[in-house]
Amino acid sequence: MLSQKNVASVTGIPARVFLDTIRAPGFPLPVAKLGKLRLVRREAFVAYLQALGGDRAPRRAQRRTSGPRLRRCCRRLALSRSGSRGPARASASSEGARRGMLPPR
């Protein structure tokens, strides 16, 4: 059996993630409750984690298509690209840049 006390040593995930996972609506495995301790069958939980690992490709594809969303977020934070390549950098007025300050929101 797995509990929040031994889940990190068995699966490598933190206790907080384990508790959030088993408390989520629709969690398919039976959870035994002993006071504040929550227990799940080890083999079943490991199989559940492996089944979740098979869904990684769609999540990665979703991240790749988040370009417009990322641009909107950067605009809200007043970030712009410097040139056509390179990481996003904060833009500031020349006077603010000399003093090391960003423009007000």
Image (cartoon, grey):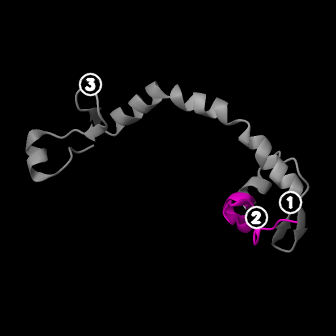
* 23 up-or-down from 70: above or below: below
Tell me the quadrant of the picture where the N terminus can be found: bottom right
Segment tinted magenta in the rendering: 1-18
Q: Residue at x 78, y 45 (%)?
A: 50
Tell me which amino acid carries mark 2.
Answer: Val
Identify the residue position indicated by label 3 in the image: 84
Q: Residue at x 74, y 37 (%)?
A: 54
**Depth order, front residue of 30/54:** 54
**Where does the image place residue 94, in percent across and percent down from the top left?**
9, 40
Q: Earlier in the sequence, mark 3 or mark 1?
A: 1
User: Label 3 to label 1, Cα distance in Å?
Assistant: 51 Å
**Depth order, front residue of 13/91:** 13
Q: How many marks?
A: 3
Q: Is residue 62 magenta?
A: no
Q: Specify whether 85 is left or right of 2.
A: left
Tell me which amino acid carries mark 1.
Answer: Arg
User: Residue 10, which numbered label?
Assistant: 2
Tell me which amino acid carries mark 3.
Answer: Ser
Identify the residue position indicated by label 1 in the image: 42
Q: Specify whether 87 is left or right of 82.
A: right
SS of the residue under disc 3: loop
